[in-house]
Image (tube, rainbow, N blue to C red):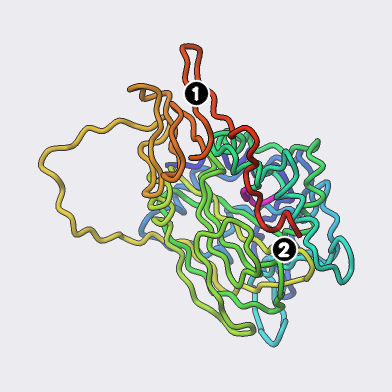
Amino acid sequence: MVLQHSAAYLALSVLVLFASAQSEGEQCLLQRSRSKVHAHVDSAVLQDKGNSSMEIDLLKVDSLAWSTNIGQEFHKCEGSHFKVDYSGTNGGMVVTKGMLLRKGLCPDKPNGTVPKFTQSLTCEAKATGCHMWCSPVWQSHHDSLDWGAFDARCRGWDGSFHNEDTDCATMGRVFTWARVDVPASKNQLDLTFAISDTCTHWCSPLWVTIYDPKNWAKSYRWCINKKDEWGGCDNAEEVPMSSWHDRSYPFHLFMQKHGYVAENFVLELAVYAEFESPEIMINSIKLKHVKEATTTPAPVNKLVTMTCGSEPSCGENHQCCRRGDSEVDAKCCPKDWSCCEDSCCPSFYTCNITEFGHTCKPPVGEVYEKPAICAL
């Protein structure tokens, strides 16, 4: 399937195109900032590049485009970088025509200990992690009180930059990120990276995330050397600094988590840091198709099952909450929550169903416990 949303969502920020190698020195990034930039990635090229028999080297392909927050309207964190076709020696590691991501040093206060930015993004009354136009997606306390509303906030983004979103200034001080569309036939990322500058608290030198661009609430995230509990990591790993690491990230884990296969994915690389300036270098980044082996024979008779609202099915840690026997009024909810017709209701909330609809409200006199970061 051809990615249809590419031109829209790539318009949100700085556009980084791989140019043909025409000079011996490091090539400059082609940067165009703000929301009025419109890039077109040739759909025919995407489909051709997405042939399942081919491997795509993202350091060489000249027809796929990266978007990044570096240079966006509200981004004011000096020292943050996203560079392609990068050659240099950092932290004792040498890379030639590779990639570099660095989050600049721009804390709320020098030598601070309380992560004020992360705290506000998590704990403020109406804070949400759905700011796809300028940030990776995460889950705030407000989001966790109503997963259905979180899902709705992250769904249907048209790719435009929201220049009224002043929270983007805060996010630019804790994130450096870059994204690229994944051709439809690719189902695995092979990455060789090194941590050339590390960090010690409220940070992660690398997040690798795949999103369903139809609903950015649906993602799978691998976190490298994360410090403190933040970011919605599905898989975490510790690796030594100043050495190359070869990793494969299979996209089928998204299906195991959410219970459906996205039509296509967006790949995101991000550096998160509240107080420090971690850096990641990449000397190989490839998308490929890996044939998945099956040991289960096909059933003789197909079992007819109902969809769950807009989703074909729910993930292993979710259940389908539906209104009556409706296929439309249904939603995938965490198994440890209760169903209130087609809404996700925390197990200790009160669900009240009437002929006029339903409500899901917290018990009177009780307060939903906030994450520990909110008490710092």
Of 261 and 14, the residue lying toward us: 261
Q: Main secondary structure of the magenta part?
A: loop
Of 283 and 369, the residue lying toward us: 369
Residue 305 image-quadrant placement: top left
Quarter of the figure that contains the N terminus? top left
Measuring from the top left, give residue 5's x and y in whole percent.
56, 38
Compare marks 1 and 2 and give the one earlier in the sequence.
2
Of 283 and 293, the residue lying toward us: 293
Q: Residue furthest right?
A: 110
Q: Residue at x 50, y 23 (%)?
A: 352
Residue type marked 2: Phe
Quarter of the figure that contains the C terminus? bottom right
Residue position marked by numbered label 2 in the rendering: 82
Measuring from the top left, give residue 54's x and y in whole percent.
40, 60
Of tags 1 and 2, the one toward the viewer is 1
Q: Which mark is residue 367?
A: none
- Circle 1 Cα neighbour tier, 10 Å, few/some/many (<14 / 14–19 / ≥20): few
Residue 282 forms part of the magenta stretch = no
Task: Give the residues in magenta.
Answer: 135-139
Residue 136 forms part of the magenta stretch = yes
Element under label 2? strand
Measuring from the top left, give residue 358's x and y in whole percent.
50, 21
Looking at the image, residue 2 lies above or below residue 19: above
Residue 251 image-quadrant placement: bottom left
Q: Residue furthest front?
A: 365
Residue position marked by numbered label 1 in the rendering: 352
